[in-house]
Image: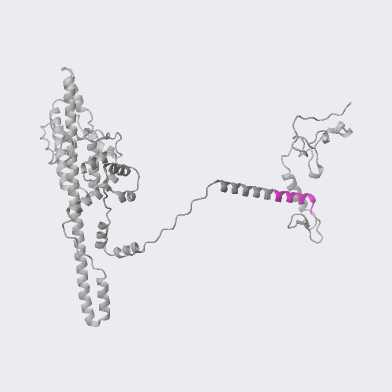
C-alpha cells in the first residue's frame, strides 16, 4: 500500500512557493499528508498552541483579536503591572521587580505598529498618485486693488445730496453704436439672466424706437429688466432734448472750510468776514442744489412725456392693426362660407381670441404668457355675457377695436405693452395725464359696448403712424 499524496493541477507560484491552497505549499510535505497513529485515531486539526489557536477559535478570520487580548493579559501580569515595550519595539524596558513582557504581547504590539505604518504608507502613495494624475489647481485670483480715489469721492459726496445727485446723473451708462444684429443679441441677453452691470457696459443705441418695442416683445424681456432699459434709454433721449439748457452752477469746493480757517486766524474782524463768507458759501450751495433739483425734475418730466407718447402711439397702432387683420379674416371667411352659415362664421371669427399680427418682424409671437398675466386676466370674472356673440352689438364692437382689449391672446404684443406700461407707471416713468386720457378712452369704449350703446368712432392713428403696419415712420 502506498501512502496517499495530495496532487493539484495548479502551477506553483514561484520557485520557492508551491501552488496556492497548500500549507506548506509543497504537496506531499504537508502535516496532513503524514499518516501517523495519532492522526489515524483522532484525525488532523490545524492547531497552533503557541498562538492560542484550538478547536474553539480555529474559524477566526484574523488573529488580531487573539493577539491583542493575549497582549493585554500579558501586560497585566507581574507585581508591577507588567513591562512596557522599548522605543524601538524590539526589547522591553522593565522596572526593578517587574517581570519581562510575554513574547506574545511584544509580537502583538509589533504587528499593530507594522500594520499601521503599512496603512499610512499606502495612503501616502495613493494621495501622491492622485495628485500626480490630476492637474494642478488654478492659482488664486490676485487681490483686488483698492480705489482710494473712488473712496475719497464717496466720502465727499456722502454729506452733499446735490453733489451726489449730479454725480449720479453724470455716471449714467453711455450708449454705444451697434448693428441690427448686435441690438437683437443684446436684447436677447437682456431677456436672459445676464447681469445688468455687465449689460450696462454695451448698451446699444436705438435710433428706431419701433424696432426697440418689437424686439422687446419678440424676446419676451421680463418686465423689471425692460423697465430698466426703458429708463436708461429715455433718460439719454431726455438729456439730448434738454441739452441746450445751461447746466446747473458748480458746487463750491472747500468754501466753508476756507472761511472757517480765515475766521479762526483773523480775530474779531475775521469773525465778521468769516461769517459773511460762510453765508455766501451756504447760499451758493443752496442755489446749486436748487439748480440740480430743477434739472432733475425737468429731465424726469421730459423722459415721462417721451416714453408715454411713444408707448401709447405704438399701442394704438397695434390695436388698429390687429383689428384690421381680424376684419379682413372675417370678411374672407364670410365670402368663402355658404350663404346660410355666413353669419355664424362671422360671429365665431369675432368671438375668437385675437393674436398680434406679424407686421414686419420675422420672429413669431411668444406662445407662453408672462407670469404677471393671470393678475390682468382677473378682469374676466367681472365681465357680463360676451357681447360679441350677439348680433346687436357686433357692429359696435367692430367699429371700435378698443372694446376688445380683453380678448387678445396672452402672448400678443398688445398685452405685452399694456403690462410694460403698468410696470413703467409703477416705476414713475409715465406721464400720468396722458395715461389717464388714454385709459379713459379705452374704458369708455368698453362700457359703451357692454351697455349696448352705439360706440364712438375710434380715434385715428397719430401723425407719423401707419395703422396697417403698426410702426413708427
**Position of residue 211 in the picture relative to residue 130 (left or right):** left
131 vs 50, nearest the viewer: 131
Write the residue at 26% across / 48% down: 177
Q: Is residue 228 above or below residue 392?
A: below
Q: Quadrant of the C terminus?
A: top left
Where in the figure is residue 104, as x and y percent of width and height? 78, 49
Residue 207 found in image quarter = top left
Q: Position of residue 75 (x, y in %)?
A: 76, 53
Q: Is residue 103 magenta?
A: yes
Residue 285, quarter of picture: bottom left
Q: Name the foreground residue: 239 vs 444.
A: 239
What secondary structure predominates along the stretch shown in magenta? helix
Q: Taking the image as drawn, is residue 401 in sight?
A: yes
Residue 300 showing in the rendered view:
no
Q: How many marks?
A: 0
Can you say whether 115 is above or below 80 in the image? above
**Segment colored magenta:** 101-114
Residue 120: percent from left, percent from top: 65, 50
Q: Position of residue 16 (x, y in %)?
A: 78, 39
Residue at x 19%, y 33% (from the top left corner): 322
Q: How is the image coloured?
A: one colour
Q: Quadrant of the N terminus?
A: top right
Left or right relative to 299: residue 195: right
Give the answer, above or below, for where 210 lies relative to 451: below
Q: Nearer the viewer, residue 253 or 45?
A: 253
Amino acid at each position: 500500500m502506498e501512502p496517499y499524496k495530495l496532487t493539484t493541477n495548479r502551477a506553483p507560484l514561484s520557485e520557492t512557493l508551491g501552488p496556492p491552497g497548500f500549507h506548506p505549499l509543497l504537496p506531499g510535505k504537508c502535516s496532513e499528508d503524514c499518516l501517523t497513529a495519532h492522526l489515524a485515531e483522532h484525525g488532523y486539526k490545524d492547531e497552533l498552541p503557541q498562538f492560542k489557536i484550538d478547536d474553539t477559535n480555529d474559524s477566526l478570520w484574523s488573529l488580531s483579536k487573539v493577539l491583542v487580548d493575549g497582549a493585554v493579559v500579558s501586560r497585566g501580569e507581574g507585581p508591577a503591572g507588567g513591562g512596557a515595550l522599548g522605543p524601538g519595539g524590539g526589547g522591553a524596558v522593565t522596572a526593578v521587580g517587574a517581570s519581562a513582557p510575554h513574547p506574545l504581547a511584544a509580537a502583538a504590539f509589533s504587528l499593530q505598529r507594522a500594520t499601521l505604518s503599512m496603512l499610512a504608507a499606502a495612503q501616502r502613495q495613493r494621495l501622491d498618485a492622485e495628485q500626480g494624475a490630476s492637474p494642478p489647481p488654478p492659482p488664486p485670483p490676485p487681490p483686488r486693488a483698492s480705489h482710494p480715489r473712488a473712496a475719497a469721492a464717496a466720502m465727499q459726496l456722502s454729506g452733499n445730496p446735490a453733489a451726489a445727485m449730479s454725480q449720479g446723473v453724470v455716471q449714467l451708462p453711455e450708449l454705444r453704436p451697434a448693428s441690427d444684429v448686435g441690438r437683437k443679441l443684446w436684447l436677447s441677453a437682456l431677456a436672459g439672466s445676464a447681469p445688468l452691470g455687465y449689460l450696462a457696459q454695451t448698451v446699444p443705441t436705438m435710433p428706431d424706437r419701433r424696432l426697440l418695442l418689437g424686439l422687446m416683445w419678440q424676446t419676451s424681456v421680463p418686465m423689471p429688466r425692460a423697465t430698466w432699459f426703458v429708463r436708461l434709454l429715455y433718460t439719454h433721449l431726455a438729456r439730448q432734448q434738454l441739452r441746450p439748457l445751461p447746466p446747473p452752477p458748480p458746487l463750491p469746493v472747500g468754501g466753508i472750510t476756507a472761511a472757517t480757517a480765515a475766521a479762526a486766524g483773523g480775530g474779531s474782524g475775521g469773525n465778521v468776514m468769516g461769517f459773511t463768507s460762510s453765508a455766501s458759501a451756504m447760499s451758493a450751495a443752496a442755489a446749486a442744489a436748487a439748480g440740480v433739483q430743477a434739472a432733475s425734475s425737468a429731465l424726469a418730466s421730459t423722459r415721462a412725456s417721451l416714453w408715454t407718447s411713444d408707448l401709447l402711439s405704438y399701442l394704438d397702432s397695434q390695436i388698429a392693426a390687429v383689428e384690421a387683420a381680424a376684419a379682413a379674416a372675417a370678411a374672407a371667411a364670410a365670402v368663402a362660407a355658404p350663404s346660410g352659415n355666413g353669419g355664424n362664421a362671422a360671429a365665431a371669427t369675432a368671438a375668437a381670441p385675437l393674436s398680434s399680427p406679424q407686421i414686419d418682424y420675422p420672429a413669431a409671437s411668444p406662445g407662453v404668457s408672462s407670469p404677471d398675466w393671470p393678475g390682468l386676466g382677473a378682469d374676466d370674472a367681472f365681465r357680463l355675457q360676451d357681447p360679441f356673440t350677439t348680433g346687436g352689438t357686433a357692429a359696435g364692437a367692430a367699429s371700435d377695436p378698443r372694446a376688445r382689449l380683453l380678448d387678445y391672446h396672452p402672448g400678443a404684443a398688445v398685452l405685452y405693452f399694456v403690462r410694460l406700461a403698468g410696470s413703467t407707471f409703477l416705476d414713475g416713468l409715465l406721464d400720468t395725464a396722458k395715461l389717464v386720457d388714454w385709459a379713459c378712452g379705452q374704458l369708455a369704449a368698453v362700457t359703451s359696448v357692454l351697455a349696448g350703446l352705439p360706440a364712438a368712432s375710434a380715434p385715428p392713428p397719430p401723425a407719423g403712424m401707419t395703422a396697417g403696419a403698426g410702426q413708427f415712420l
